C-alpha cells in the first residue's frame, strides 16, 4: 500500500476514475468535488469544507453540504448526492456550473414522481440492467429509489420499512444483484425477486472478526466494490480495515491491522485512517479515507 494525494481537506467520501481528465481521479472531498493526478489535487466545484451550505454557482462559488457519492452520466456531466441537503445536484465539467438535478435541496421527504423528495441519500449508481436509470440508496427511509436519467422520474423499488442505515452499494453487471453496506453488515437486494437479505455480518454485535459470513463482525462499513465477479471488498470504516468477501466460500479476510493511522507497506501491517470509499481501476485499488488517498497495486489474493 502506498499514499497518493495528501492535499485532502476532509474525507474522501467517493472516488472514481475521472472521465473528463484522462488519468486523473475524481473525488468527493467533503463539500468539494475535486480532481487529482495522485500528486496535485484541484477543486472543480464547491466552496471550502468549513463553509457547507446550499448555493448553485460556478466552481468555488457553489456550496454543497456533504457530497457522499456521485456518478458520471457522460464525459462532461456529474450527478452528485448532496446528502445533507437531501437532493441530487449536477456539475457541468465544461463550465464547472452546478445545478439542481432531482429532489428539493431545501426540503426532505419520501415522494416519488417528477417532483420527488429525498431524505439524506448516501449513494448513487447507474443501473447495470438499464443504463438510462440511476439507483439511489436512501437510509432515511431504508429504501432504494430508481430514477430516469433523462426524464428524472423517481419511483421506489424497495423499502425495508421504518428507518435504516443503508450506506453504499455496488451492482453486479451480470445478475443485477445489488450489494449494500449497512452499520454492521452487507446485504443483498435481488433485482429479479425484489427481496433483501443480510449476507454477511452477525445479526448482533459490532467488531472486526473475520471467518464465515454469518460470524463476521463489522464496524460501520461504507464503500463496497467488486475485485472480480466472485469477490467483494468493503471499506470497514471504523474498523480501519478493508474486508475481502469471497462469495464462493462465504468467508472473509482483512487487509491492514485495524490500527488507525497512515502507515504504508505490507497489506498485513498497513494502517488506515477511517477508510470510506474504494474503487478498482485496472490493476490498482484506490482507497479514499480521512485526509488522503491510498493505493494498492496488483492482484489482491484471498
Image (spheres, rainbow, N blue to C red):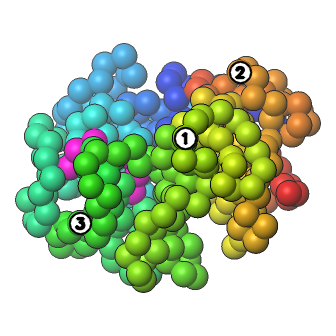
Task: Say whether residue 137 is left or right of residue 240.
Answer: left
Q: Secondary structure at mark 3?
A: strand
Query: Is label 1 or label 3 in front?
Result: 1
Q: What whole-number distance in Å separates the C-alpha atoms at marks 2 and 3?
A: 38 Å
On screen, 212 above or below 260?
below
Decide if residue 185 is in sight here: yes
Task: Identify the residue at image location x=54%, y=47%.
Answer: 203
Q: Earlier in the sequence, mark 1 or mark 3?
A: 3
Q: Where residue 130 sits in the image (x, y, percent)?
A: 39, 81
Per the image, the residue denoted by label 3 is: 156
Task: Say whether residue 56 is left or right of residue 124.
Answer: left
Query: Is label 1 or label 2 in front?
Result: 1
- Name, please, the residue furthest toward the front: 204
* Residue 261 quadrant: top right
Q: Is residue 83 magenta?
A: no
Task: Identify the residue at image location x=88%, y=31%.
Answer: 269
Q: Where residue 291 sits in the image (x, y, percent)?
A: 60, 24
Task: Identify the residue at image location x=23%, y=66%.
Answer: 156
Decide if residue 121 is in sight here: no
Per the image, the residue denoted by label 2 is: 260
Q: Which residues are magenta?
A: 118-124
Amino acid at each position: 500500500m502506498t499514499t497518493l494525494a495528501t492535499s485532502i481537506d476532509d474525507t474522501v467520501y467517493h472516488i472514481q476514475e475521472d472521465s473528463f481528465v484522462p488519468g486523473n481521479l475524481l473525488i468527493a472531498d467533503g463539500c468539494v468535488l475535486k480532481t487529482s493526478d495522485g500528486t496535485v489535487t484541484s477543486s472543480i466545484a464547491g466552496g471550502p469544507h468549513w463553509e457547507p451550505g446550499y448555493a448553485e454557482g460556478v466552481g468555488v462559488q457553489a456550496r454543497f453540504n456533504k457530497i457522499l457519492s456521485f456518478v458520471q452520466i457522460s464525459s462532461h456531466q456529474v450527478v452528485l448526492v448532496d446528502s445533507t441537503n437531501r437532493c441530487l445536484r449536477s456539475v457541468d465539467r465544461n463550465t464547472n456550473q452546478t445545478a439542481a438535478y432531482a429532489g428539493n435541496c431545501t426540503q426532505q421527504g419520501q415522494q416519488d414522481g417528477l417532483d420527488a423528495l429525498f431524505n439524506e441519500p448516501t449513494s448513487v449508481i447507474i443501473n447495470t440492467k438499464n443504463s438510462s436509470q440511476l439507483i439511489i440508496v436512501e437510509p432515511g427511509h431504508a429504501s432504494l429509489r430508481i430514477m430516469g436519467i433523462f426524464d428524472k422520474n423517481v419511483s421506489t423499488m424497495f423499502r425495508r420499512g421504518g428507518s435504516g442505515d443503508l450506506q453504499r452499494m455496488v451492482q453486479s453487471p451480470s445478475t443485477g444483484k445489488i450489494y449494500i453496506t449497512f452499520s454492521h453488515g452487507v446485504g443483498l437486494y435481488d433485482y429479479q425477486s425484489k427481496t433483501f437479505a443480510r449476507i454477511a455480518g452477525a445479526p448482533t454485535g459490532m467488531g472486526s472478526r473475520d471467518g464465515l459470513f454469518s460470524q463476521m463482525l463489522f464496524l460501520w462499513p461504507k464503500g463496497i466494490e467488486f475485485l472480480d465477479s466472485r469477490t467483494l471488498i468493503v471499506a470497514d470504516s471504523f474498523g480501519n480495515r478493508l474486508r475481502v468477501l469471497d462469495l464462493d466460500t462465504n468467508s472473509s479476510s482483512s487487509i491492514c491491522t485495524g490500527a488507525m493511522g497512515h502507515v504504508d507497506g505490507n497489506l498485513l501491517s498497513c494502517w488506515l485512517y477511517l477508510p470510506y470509499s474504494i474503487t478498482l481501476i485496472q490493476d490498482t485499488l484506490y482507497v479514499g479515507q480521512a485526509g488522503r488517498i491510498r493505493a494498492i497495486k496488483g492482484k489482491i489474493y484471498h
